[in-house]
Amino acid sequence: MSRGEPSFWVRRFTPLIRPGGRVLDVAAGSGRHTAFLCGCGFEVTAVDRRTEGLQDLSGNRCHVVALDLEAGPSETALAPLGGGYDGIVVTNYLHRPLFSWLAAALAPDGVLIYETFAAGNERFGNPRNPDFLLRPGELLAAFAVLTVIAFEQGEVGQPVEAVRQRIAAIKGAVGRLPA
């Protein structure tokens, strides 16, 4: 199955995740990041409401969980996923009530790699609904409890024109940085 290339942002900050560690791929979609992370030797849990496109990835280091991330309070809905993740990856997905849970689900020195669409994206296409677009600096504010390694917001031309916001952050003090 062709899943497409992993995001350059995810590729750039994956080396910060503890080798062989546990990684959660939130709203995994077709599994492009799940496949990449499993290929890097991580134990990956891919979670999405619909998992048909992920089943071929299910194996000894890759676990697929069908879960509606927006059903009820975040603590209740996400309880089956546990915590202590060495890495959490979220791309092209926004459900603000998950922010505090994501930060809490990281293990000490765990890495959050998050990128999605931001205000202004309506000029380029979907999503256009402001409920699904980050406000300026929103990821910085949402994850202020973490140590920010990198943050970007603005227009991008690749892989398609869009307005995006990205953050890479660590739970705890900064260790080694990526090249």
Image: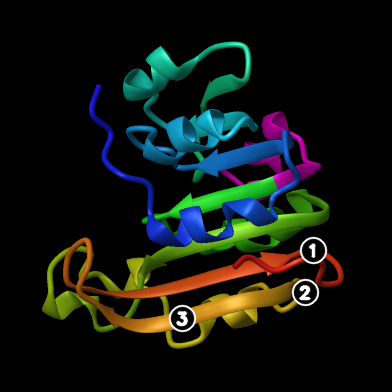
What colour-coding does the image apply? rainbow
* Residue type pointed to by label 3: Glu
> Is 39 situated left or right of 17 in this image?
left
Residue 48 in sight here: no
Query: Whole-Å distance between the Cαs marked 2 and 3?
Result: 18 Å
Read off the residue under disc 3: 152
Q: Quadrant of the C terminus?
A: bottom right
* Residue that appears at 54% across and 79% down: 151
- Quarter of the image holding residue 150? bottom right
Read off the residue under disc 1: 171
Give the secondary structure at mark 3. strand
The disc, 1 or 3, on the residue closer to the chain's N-terminal end is 3
In this rendering, which labeled residue sits more in front, label 2 or label 3? 3
99 shown above or below 44: below
Read off the residue under disc 2: 145
* Residue that appears at 57% across and 35% down: 40
- 79 part of magenta stretch: yes
144 shown above or below 79: below
* Residue type pointed to by label 1: Lys
Query: Whole-Å distance between the Cαs marked 1 and 3?
Result: 19 Å
Query: Whole-Å distance between the Cαs marked 1 and 2?
Result: 8 Å
Q: What's the magenta region?
A: 72-86
Q: Residues within 10 Å of mark 2 (few under 14, many from 20)?
A: some
Closer-to-camera residue (179/22): 179
